[in-house]
Amino acid sequence: MTAMNPKNFQHCRYEVDGPVVTITINRPEVLNALHPQGHQEMSDAFDCFAADDSLRVAIVTGSGDRAFCVGTDLKFLAETGLANKPKTGFAGMTHRFDLWKPVIGAVNGLCLGGGVEMLGGCDLAVASEHARFGLPETRVGLAASGGGTLQRLPRQIAMKHAMALVLTGQPISAQEAARIGLINEVVPADQVLARARELAEEILACAPLAVMASKQVMLQSLAQADLSAVMHENYPILQQMLASQDAIEGPKAFAEKRKPNWTGS
């Protein structure tokens, strides 16, 4: 595990509740925009989550009720010229390709630029009814190329919807984001975290290795266009799952009409 103690974080909060951790960007004064220190702390937080076997699901959100994340802290950038990020990418998550535990986005407000990039790194997402989503980079002479959005978006939603978001730079509502598949659902503002936790609980009802194996197969299979090839690919966690005690426990519990006792082994 990283040497960083989550209790010492200044720009994010790391709150553990059973097998679920909530990682919150804590820079509400700048609408949770991120600067180098913020990126590093978020990366450290996800390192802690990845390394802790007792944690199974992460929820990522923003502090306050105005913004999830509006991207890079441009004022800090203008004052210092510093825009460096860790190898794990924007918010320590967009370039993290070996995290098979689920991550749920709880979008509590504005989700712009890097915020949408973070969303692309989430497996599920719920948003408040007042949330807004956008990629305004093209309107200021830039491209949304820093966190993999241009690569991920066409893989996650229909190409025409992805093109509209990227090429026009126009923001969309939470309802529209749900319609095009950018997020899973829209809920009242005061229920965003509660609904994210409900989704986490639904995941926790499933076998840990089965969840991670499923995520690994789905994401790694996107790397190849040949369906027959990916269906015969070797997925390590899938093999681990098939040989696990949980693979025996699941059918046994079903036959005995009881809840399974998952051990993750």
Image: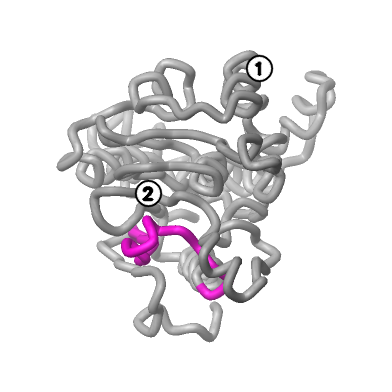
x and y, in percent, of residue 97 in the image: 67, 51
Residue in front for this viewpoint, 200 or 14 = 14
Residue depicted at x 43% and y 51%: 69
Where is the N terminus found, in terms of image quarters? bottom right
Does residue 160 lie above or below 69 as drawn? above
- The answer to whether residue 265 shows anywhere in this view is yes
Residue depicted at x 42% and y 29%: 183
Disc 1 is placed on an element classified as helix
Displayed quadrant of residue 126: top left
x and y, in percent, of residue 201 in the image: 28, 43
x and y, in percent, of residue 246 in the image: 45, 46
Q: Label 2, label 1: how many angstroms apart (C-alpha)?
A: 25 Å
Disc 2 is placed on an element classified as strand
Residue that mark 2 sits on = 68
User: Disc 2 residue type?
Assistant: Phe
Displayed quadrant of residue 91: bottom right
Does residue 117 lie above or below 184 as drawn? below
Residue depicted at x 41% and y 72%: 11
Q: Residues within 10 Å of mark 1 (few under 14, many from 20)?
A: few
Residue in front for this viewpoint, 265 or 118 = 118
- The answer to whether residue 245 shows anywhere in this view is no
Q: How is the image coloured?
A: one colour
Does residue 171 lie above or below 261 as drawn? above
x and y, in percent, of residue 179 in the image: 41, 16
Residue 76 highlighted magenta (yes or no): no
Horizontal side of 42 relative to 88 (left or right) equals: left
Residue depicted at x 49% and y 55%: 265
Displayed quadrant of residue 81: bottom right
Residue that mark 1 sits on = 159
Q: Residues within 10 Å of mark 2 (few under 14, many from 20)?
A: many
Q: Which residues are magenta?
A: 20-37
Q: State the residue lying farthest toward the left.
A: 190
